[in-house]
Image (cartoon, grey):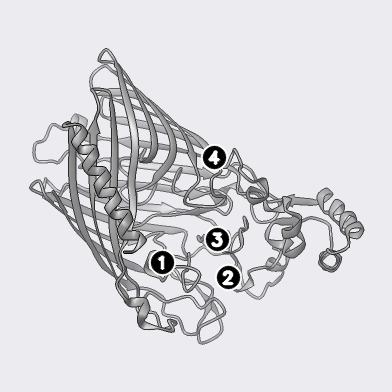
Amino acid sequence: MSARKCWLIAVVLAAAVWAEEGSDIKINAWGWLNFGRVGSGYTQQAKGAEKDIDFTEEWLEDFSAGIRAERCFNKTFKARLHLGLTTKYIVDNPELLSYEFWKRGWAVYLVEAAIERTMTFSDVHSLLLEFGYFPVRYNPEAANLGEYLFRSTPYPTVIESGFELADKEKLTGLHAGYKMNFLDKSFLKADLYLSSAMRHIPIFDFSPAIVVAGNLQNFVELGWGMQFYSLFSIDETKTTPGKDPFRVSVYPERVIYIDTIPLDTITYLKDTVMYDEDTQVVRQLILRDTTFYSFRGIKTMGRITLNPRAFIPSEALGPEDLKIYAEVAILGLKNYRGWYENIADRIPIMFGINLPTFKLLDILSFQLQYFRSPYWNTWENMWKSGSCVPYQGLMTGATYDQYNADTSQSKLIHEDDWKWSLYASRKVGKHLRFSLQFANDNLFKTKYMPPPPTQSKYTEVMRETWMKDANGKEKWGMIRDWYWMAKIMFYL
């Protein structure tokens, strides 16, 4: 019997024992099928060193099912365990050496596992204490784009979105949430988080965060948040790679910015890395004239939601219709010499509106995003090289000065500054929900590719990597590129 089957049996038995010890337990099950297709995109004319996969006209499909158990030990204390089972079908990738990559496989994954205690003080004040692996969502109107505080990294500056991902971000650690209800349909709340990194490197670094929000008369809601990303480091040489002497000696261009040292000094450093005395001399020179890039950074966001329905008592409109909302974030308050000199390049802005459907749909959301980062929106360098600098396509490994020395064509990437999303959802009865999305967003290819270290890439579905057309010109996808995705979901 495989280890996976043994683990599944152990989980089922543990759940059975858990349920037998107490009667106050709720068990829910669900399943869904995602399917869609990339409609319009730039078709590659040639393959370059990147060997990226063109998703134009590819079908995207995956299926998941799960079970959620919640046990209440008393009125204030409960525990949650949520497991999922998923499969996926990769795209028709001509780079694959074997068709075995298409063989269906199943994987068990953890959706949620946490304990919580809720304390109420009269009808006004309440306090929630939570520990474990739990979902977090601070902007309920973000149907796709937005939620930048926890769906991003500062250095490199990368954001993520995609079909029904807005409510699927998870944190591992501690959460304390305070809420005060006052007046009528008004509240103030504050949430504190201390989370350990599980999705992105540096793995296990701790990041404290605060999110506050206030709602007045169900008409205007304001929110603000800040996260100190990787504030507490487990290994400083991983958080700030330039503090690792070996990495500085092997590829300094990926971990530091050299202000005054000529390139032949870097060559000298590589040649003399085995000689302690010479290496120490050169390293001291670099420490004096070098900027050390770090994954550590401060992220902050602000948001606003206006709900005209608070003053339009129409029964023809749904509760989510006509909401207008926006969110802006700064992903890294610190500027670095070289790659991160302009803070405006790290500011994504989202604004949207819930269009009226007169109860035909639960929600019809249209969103726009402006993010003027001049670099690729990808975690390629982070995962492949442990590097904080942006990914540079075919010039990966170049210093900042080398990267900008080639004036034959612009290296600034602004064709993808604008993103858009149209999302619709409708629940039918108590057990079915249908949703559909058309978008050009920040959906990554990774989940539709074989696992690393084979063909897996961290680039976006909607934009090409640095490829050249038939005339040798480097070209990128445009805002007119799009995909659609649909979901059929059941609840039990």
Mark 3 — residue?
383
Mark pair 2, 1: CA separation: 16 Å
The spot of residue 89 in percent (x, y) is 31, 71
The tally of labels here is 4
Q: Residues within 10 Å of mark 1 (few under 14, many from 20)?
A: many
Q: Amino acid at mark 1?
A: Lys
Mark 1 — residue?
445
Mark pair 3, 1: CA separation: 14 Å
Mark pair 2, 4: CA separation: 30 Å
Q: Residues within 10 Å of mark 4 (few under 14, many from 20)?
A: many
* Callout 3 secondary element: helix
* Upstream in sequence: badge 2 or badge 3: 3
Q: Are marks 2 and 4 in contact (CB under 8 Å)?
A: no
Does residue 322 appear in the picture of this structure? no
Residue 393's disc is 2
Mark 4 — residue?
206
* Upstream in sequence: badge 2 or badge 4: 4
Q: Are marks 2 and 3 in contact (CB under 8 Å)?
A: no
